[in-house]
Amino acid sequence: MRIDIITVVPDLLKSPFEASIMQRSIAKGLVDVQFHNLRDYTDTNYKQVDDYQFGGGAGMVMQIEPIDKCISKLKSERDYDEVIYMTPDGETLDQGMANTISLKGNIIILCGHYKGVDQRVRDHFITKEISIGDYVLSGGELGALILCDAVIRLIPGVLGNETSALTDSFQDGLLAPPIYTRPAEYKGWKVPEILTSGNTPKIEEWREEQAYQRTKERRPDLLDE
């Protein structure tokens, strides 16, 4: 998978891709992440990529021209499955969406900034708009990082155990059950005996029951869905 991220603050994005799972996925050649500074696509003396709103109002708006130049250049080099815009009024990111995007080949992620982008960008270039929640950040960069992390970990070969991602919360519509590791007893707090029994069918049955109960208690809305 190739991910091209368009931003006005590329330095804000780079370090998370230099550690842990995302760094290993890049080192293995499973994903190629490229950052594109939008200011490189403007001819103004001050590398300006924003301007005042038509009709007045507070907040600057990202201009269409540098975004068009950047996206058009990328599209001239390869085909893209999605051009994603990170925005608070987009479709809320969930596990199902992450699963779907992880199957794509090449995607572009445009990070909004300031008040947002000229609506014509959304009308003519964007194929999918994504939000990470009902709140507003300074820009779409942190949202893009969350999207990338959620997607990259699902790519085959990224995680050491191929089944790990399949047992995460939300994959089957439920929250994940409680998990434990050694020691089996600590300060008198014991691991449920079933988990040390070696009876795999019974363990799976216990986990399913626990997942259901935890979902019922904490996220009953998932059961309604």
Image (cartoon, grey):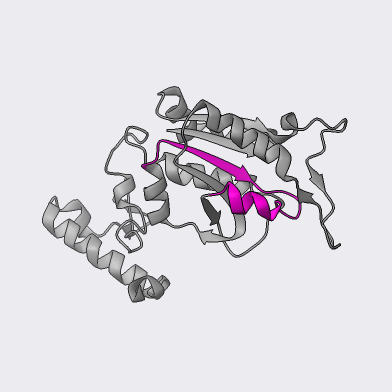
Tally the numbered discs. 0
**Left or right: 84 as drawn, with respect to 201:** right
Q: Position of residue 128 (x, y in %)?
A: 51, 52
Q: Is residue 8 visible?
A: no
Magenta stretch contains residue 78: no
123 falls in the magenta region: yes
Estimate the x, y position of residue 99 in percent, counting from the top left.
Answer: 37, 49
Image-based side of 186 in relation to 81, left or right: left
Q: Quadrant of residue 212?
A: bottom left
Q: Nearer the viewer, residue 122 or 132?
A: 122
Which quarter shows the C terminus?
Answer: bottom left
Q: Quadrant of the N terminus?
A: top left
Which residue lies at the image location 38% right of the left edge and 75% below the top edge? Answer: 220
Q: Is residue 199 left or right of residue 133?
A: left
Residue depicted at 42% across the width and 50% down the height: 98
Which of 184/225 is in front?
Answer: 225
Res. 5 visible in picture? yes
Q: Can you say whether 104 is above or below 92 in the image?
A: above
What are the residue bounds of the magenta stretch?
A: 103-126
